[in-house]
Image (cartoon, rainbow, N blue to C red):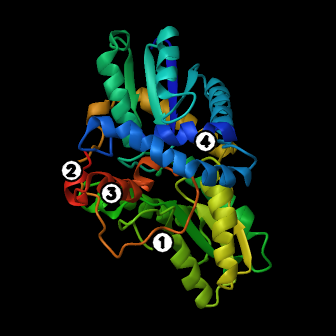
Amino acid sequence: MGRVGVLLLNLGGPDKLEDVGPFLFNLFSDPEIIRLPFRWLQKPLAWFIASRRTKTSQENYKHIGGGSPLRRITEAQGEALKEQLKDLGQEANIYVGMRYWHPYTEEAIALLTQDKIEQLVILPLYPQFSISTSGSSFRLLERLWQENPKLQPAEYTVIPSWYKQSNYLQAMAQLIAQELDQFPNPDEVHIFFSAHGVPKSYVEEAGDPYQQEIEECTVLIMRTLNRPNAHTLAYQSRVGPVEWLQPYTEDALKELGAKGVQDIVVVPISFVSEHIETLQEIDIEYREIAEEAGIHNFRRAPAPNTHPVFIRALADLVIDSLQKPSLKLSQVTQMKKKVKMYPQERWEWGITTSAEVWNGRIAMLGFIALIIELVTGRGLLHMIGLL
């Protein structure tokens, strides 16, 4: 089989407060999804938006220790995966490739090329596929493969999504169960799944399978948990004037409070590592909303991080993919057509303030569209298009 490598893909996040500004600049400089009418406008606009948001974002990161733990956790997951694979008889080098901060995907590719990896498994740390997360990284990798002759001899295979993996479901069920058991009446606790949102147009116009995979994943986790608890699925981190997947987390929490629900366990279903969406947005912002709504017993299931059953799930995915026919980047789901990002409901802004959004490129589309309109005087409908 030759030398085997595993490339773990993730978003990335600022390691310290000084990194927040450059990190945001990287987010908003991405031309893959935000198409501007003038190429020269991309970076100046990214600088303008990042400059406006840096101070607020830094305040949010101060609440969680001054930086994102995402790199540390992802590297720990990589080390644990390497050991688990070794125990299963599969030697492999592990590489971490972040989309918007160090270690960048390009850095990981340079390392695995230097190591002369002959068989590569590309494994995004997003259980469910979205064109805005895994898809963005896959598009970058496809371009790198086309531009770098040294990559051509390497055989590779892609794992687009893996939310059905049995050990992943088991790990999620165990993490939920341990929180339920902290309550006096565990069976009466409401389980609240909170997934990162995406604009509704991604699903309806571009054919993004994300919503379907999230909904199916929720059903599978509840089936694996095999407990009688009621549950809700909602979507967090909405920002901007466009309509995102609903129900929104803040609205769903208020609705449960109005119904008299007092005990709740929040499950960050689309996240496998702790970062600002879990530590700041859920643990601080949504907790406050829940308490104001009358939900006084609020707990959160931790992200899988390096949970041993979760690491076994990743190892099984790698081994299974090495034994199956390879799946190429060009075969992975892509945008079907252009998607216009314009206000589809009343003009309003999301209430959450977290900076390290699961996909910062889409989280600020509404703001970007507004700035472009102000700068150029041209309509949103003609200005913003997505590949």
Q: Quadrant of the C terminus?
A: top left
10 Å crowding of disc 4: few (<14), some (14-19), many (20+): many
Residue kind at label 3, given as amino acid type = Leu
Which x, y percent locates residue 44?
40, 39
Give the SS element for disc 2: loop
- 299 versus 174 height, above or below: below
Residue 184 is left or right of residue 42, and the answer is right
Answer with mark 1 or mark 2, whichever residue precedes in sequence.
1
Residue at horizontal 38%, vertical 23%?
156
Which of pointers 1 and 3 indicates the residue nearer the eye? 3
Report the residue marked by disc 4. 20
How far apart are labels 2 and 4 at the CA level? 31 Å
Q: Residue 374 carries which label?
A: 3
- Mark 1 = which residue? 248
Dots 2 and 4: beta carbons under 8 Å? no
Of tags 2 and 3, the one toward the viewer is 3
Mark linked to residue 338: 2
- The image quadrant that residue 204 belongs to is bottom left
